[in-house]
C-alpha cells in the first residue's frame, strides 16, 4: 500500500505535521530508517512517521552481549544505545533518507542534561521533522532510567531541549515510575509538545544452569505483547493530563495488529507505535491501516481522530 492508497480518513495532524497514517515505527526497531526498506513489500510510505535510532553526542559501542533475549510473549533488549554519534547521523545518514516518503523523527539520548541539549541543538539545524527525547531508556547504566523516573530531572531535560530547538518536541515517558501523570504534567510545563507512552519496562532474565544473567547488561527493556495492558493504562493516565491542552500521544507497547492499535487510540493516543512486532512481521503496517479503515466504516466514523480518547465512561 503506497501513501497515495492509504485511506484518507487515517491522515492525522501531529504537532502541526501531517501524518498520512497514525502508525509510527518506533526508535531502535528500524535502525536509521532504511533497514526495513530492504524487505520486499515493505515501504516507509505505509506509516505516518519513523523514529530513528537513539542518538548520543559521541559514538557509542553499546553493551556487551547478549543484548537480546526472548521471553514469554515478549522480548528483553539491552542494546545500550549503540550509534555513530549525532554528527555522523546528520552528515552521513539523513541525506540518504527520502523525506517525501514519510516524516522522520530523531531520537535524542544522553547521560547529562548538557548532552541532551547539545544533541537536540544539532538536530535543530537538520531536515529532521521532529525530535523525540528519550529520558527513559532502561538498558543503559547511566542517564535514562534516572532522568525518566524523577519528575524534576525529567523536566530539567525537557527544558534544556526546548531551549535548543523550535521543532516539535516529543517526550518518551518511562513506565518505571510511581506517577507517570505527574511526570507528564511537569514535562508539559517544561515545554513538551507531545508524548510517547510508554518506553519498555525494566526486566531481567537468568540462565538457571549457569546461574548468570542472560543479558550482558544484566537488566534490559521488556517489550512485546506482555506489556500491552500496562501500556494501555499509562496512555490513558497521560491522556487525562493532555486532553485539555490537545497534546498528542504516541501510544505504544505490545501492538500486534489493528485491533491493538484501535484500543490504544480509544485509550487516548493520537498515533500508535509499532516496534517488536516488526521483528517477526515486517509487513504488518499495511494490514493495520486496512483494519483501521474497516473499523471506521463499520462504526460509521469519518476520521480516525474520532477514536482518540473515546473510552466510555462508567455512566455512559
Image (cartoon, rainbow, N blue to C red):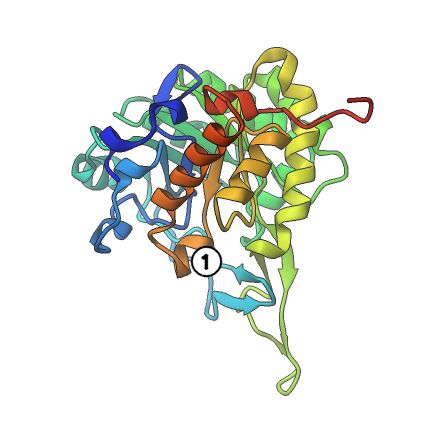
Residue neighbourhood size for the residue with mark 1, other residues' Cα within 10 Å, grouped as few (<14), some (14–19), many (≥20): many
Q: Residue furthest right?
A: 315
Visible residue check, residue 167: yes
**In the image shown, does 256 or 83 lie closer to the viewer?**
256
Which residue is depicted at the point 50% across and 22% down? Answer: 301
Q: Is residue 254 left or right of residue 85?
A: right
Q: Relative to 44, say whether 185 is above or below.
A: above
Q: Is residue 200 above or below residue 124?
A: below
**Which picture quadrant has residue 102?**
top left
How many numbered circles does the render carry?
A: 1
Residue 35, image x, y percentages: 27, 52
Which quadrant of the figure contains the C terminus? top right
Give me the residue at 54% from left, 53% from top. 140
Q: Is residue 24 left or right of residue 247?
A: left
Point out residue 115 in the picture as x, y percentages from the top left corner: 46, 34
**Secondary structure under badge 1?**
loop
Task: Return the residue at label 1.
Answer: 79
**Quadrant showing the N terminus:** top left
Residues 134 and 152: in front is: 134
Classify residue 221 by image quadrant. bottom right
At x 30%, y 45%, the residue is 32
Q: Is residue 241 left or right of residue 262?
A: right
- The quarter of the picture where residue 103 lies is top left
Front residue of 192 and 35: 35
Check the image and name the residue furthest to the top: 245
Q: What residue appears at the point 48 percent right and 48 percent down from the top-left corner?
A: 257
Residue 156 percent across, percent down from the top left:
60, 25
Nearer the observer, 44 or 133: 44
- From this viewpoint, is residue 151 visible? no
Residue 42 percent across, percent down from the top left: 26, 49
Amino acid at each position: 500500500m503506497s501513501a497515495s492508497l492509504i485511506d484518507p480518513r487515517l491522515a492525522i495532524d501531529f504537532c502541526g505535521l501531517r501524518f498520512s497514517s497514525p502508525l509510527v515505527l518506533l526508535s531502535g526497531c528500524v535502525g536509521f530508517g532504511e533497514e526495513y526498506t530492504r524487505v520486499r513489500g515493505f515501504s516507509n510510505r505505509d506509516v505516518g512517521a519513523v523514529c530513528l535510532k537513539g542518538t548520543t553526542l559521541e559514538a557509542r559501542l553499546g553493551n556487551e552481549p547478549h543484548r537480546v533475549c526472548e521471553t514469554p510473549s515478549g522480548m528483553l533488549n539491552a542494546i545500550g544505545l549503540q550509534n555513530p554519534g549525532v554528527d555522523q547521523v546528520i552528515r552521513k545518514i539523513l541525506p540518504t533518507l527520502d523525506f517525501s516518503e514519510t516524516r522522520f523523527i530523531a531520537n535524542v539520548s544522553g547521560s547529562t542534561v548538557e548532552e541532551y541539549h547539545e544533541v537536540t541543538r544539532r538536530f535543530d539545524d537538520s531536515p529532521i521533522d521532529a525530535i523525540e527525547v528519550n529520558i527513559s531508556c532502561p538498558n543503559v547504566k547511566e542517564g535514562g532510567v534516572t532522568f525518566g523516573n524523577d519528575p524534576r530531572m525529567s523536566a530539567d531535560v525537557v527544558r534544556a531541549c526546548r531551549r535548543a530547538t523550535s521543532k516539535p518536541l516529543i517526550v518518551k515517558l518511562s513506565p518505571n515510575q510511581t506517577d507517570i501523570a505527574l511526570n507528564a504534567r511537569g514535562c508539559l510545563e517544561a515545554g513538551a509538545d507531545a508524548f510517547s507512552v510508554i518506553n519498555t519496562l525494566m526486566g531481567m532474565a537468568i540462565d538457571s544452569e549457569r546461574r548468570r544473567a542472560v543479558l550482558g547488561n544484566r537488566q534490559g527493556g521488556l517489550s512485546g505483547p506482555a506489556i500491552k495492558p500496562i501500556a494501555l493504562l499509562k496512555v490513558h493516565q497521560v491522556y487525562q493530563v493532555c486532553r485539555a491542552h490537545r497534546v498528542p500521544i504516541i501510544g505504544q507497547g505490545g501492538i500486534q495488529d489493528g485491533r491493538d492499535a484501535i484500543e490504544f487510540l480509544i485509550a487516548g493516543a493520537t498515533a500508535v507505535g509499532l516496534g517488536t512486532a516488526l521483528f517477526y512481521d515486517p509487513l504488518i503496517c499495511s494490514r493495520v491501516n486496512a483494519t483501521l479503515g474497516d473499523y471506521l466504516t463499520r462504526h460509521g466514523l469519518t476520521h480516525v481522530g474520532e477514536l482518540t480518547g473515546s473510552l466510555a465512561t462508567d455512566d455512559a
